[in-house]
Every structure is written in C-alpha cells, then in structure tokens.
Amino acid sequence: MQVELLRASHCVGESNVHIGLTPKYRKAIFSDDKTRILTRDYIVEASRKHGFVVAAIGFDPDHCHVFITHWKNFAIAKLANLTKGFSSYMMRKHHWELFKKYLYGDSFWSDGYFYRTVGAVNAETVKKYVSESQEYGYEGKALEQRKLIEFRPN
C-alpha cells in the first residue's frame, strides 16, 4: 500500500482520523436520502473551506462516519467542531423541514463524537524501522540507538 505523505514547508507526515458523528437524540434522520446527501455535501464543503480532506464518508440511519486526512493544523476536537458546526448550521437554516419531526431546538448533532486515529504505522513497522536504523548510521558510522523494548512503560 502506497502512503501519500503531506508535505509542507517544515514537515512531512501522515495524519488520518476516523470521526463518528451522531444526530441529536440518535434519531434515524439519515434514512432519508436527501438529508444524507445534503449533510455529506456540507461536511465536504467545510473540509474544503478549512483545508483538510474528507477521504470517505458513510452513513447509517442514526450516525455518520467521516474519514479525514491531511489535517496537520488542527486538533481532532477542532475537526469535529468544524464539520459539525458548519453542517448543523446549514442543515437547520436551509433544510429544517426534512428532519423537524425528529429533532427540536437548535441542535442537529449530539454533543460528543467518536474518534480513532489511523495510519500506516503500527508496532511491526516501528520494530522494523528501529532494527534497521541500528545497522546504519549517519555517514556510515554506527549508531548507538535504544532498542524498542527499552521504551516499554514500567
């Protein structure tokens, strides 16, 4: 699998996160195709506006999964806030009729969210990197490098 790295002026890296969003009261508002499509479009619009990428988005009747990449300038809480805030505002302002029988008040999303960071780096990748790094040094000089096992918490 080829990993696309984000390149900026002073860094290179990868940042991926899966965020799960739930409508207020966990109502099945995404059973409706139009509500699902409009919500998706507003989440993608928020990502373009703020400079991160929604690589995938999926819906179940009562929640939404958003896979975000290239978000190096944001905390995960800010990503959730940006996607939820803009989509909630636009849905309530322009499409209230679609879901007013399920929701009331001035909320579209529930207060919380689920998140999990994901990426190409795992324990095996780190072990391989550390073991290979011990064999080669800067300008051919051997490195004195700690082994992965030495980083275990007590």
Image (spheres, grey):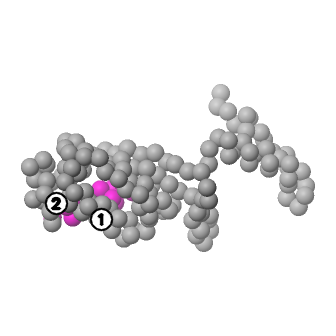
Main secondary structure of the magenta stretch:
helix
Residue 95 within the magenta-colored segment of the rendering: no
Image location of residue 56, percent across then percent down: 41, 57
Residue segment shown in magenta: 79-93
- The residue identified by callout 2 is 92
Instruction: Decide which of 135, 55 is in the foreground and name it.
Output: 55
- The residue identified by callout 1 is 41
User: Residue at the location (37% across, 56% down)?
Assistant: 57
Image location of residue 140, percent across then percent down: 90, 58
The secondary structure type at the circle numbered 2 is helix
User: Residue at the location (33% across, 59% down)?
Assistant: 83
Dividing the picture into quarters, in which one does residue 44 lie? bottom left
Instruction: Decide which of 94, 9 is in the foreground and name it.
Output: 94
Let me know if residue 100 appears in the view: yes
Image location of residue 80, percent across then percent down: 36, 54
Q: Quadrant of the N terminus?
A: bottom right
Q: In this picture, is 54 found above or below 108?
A: below
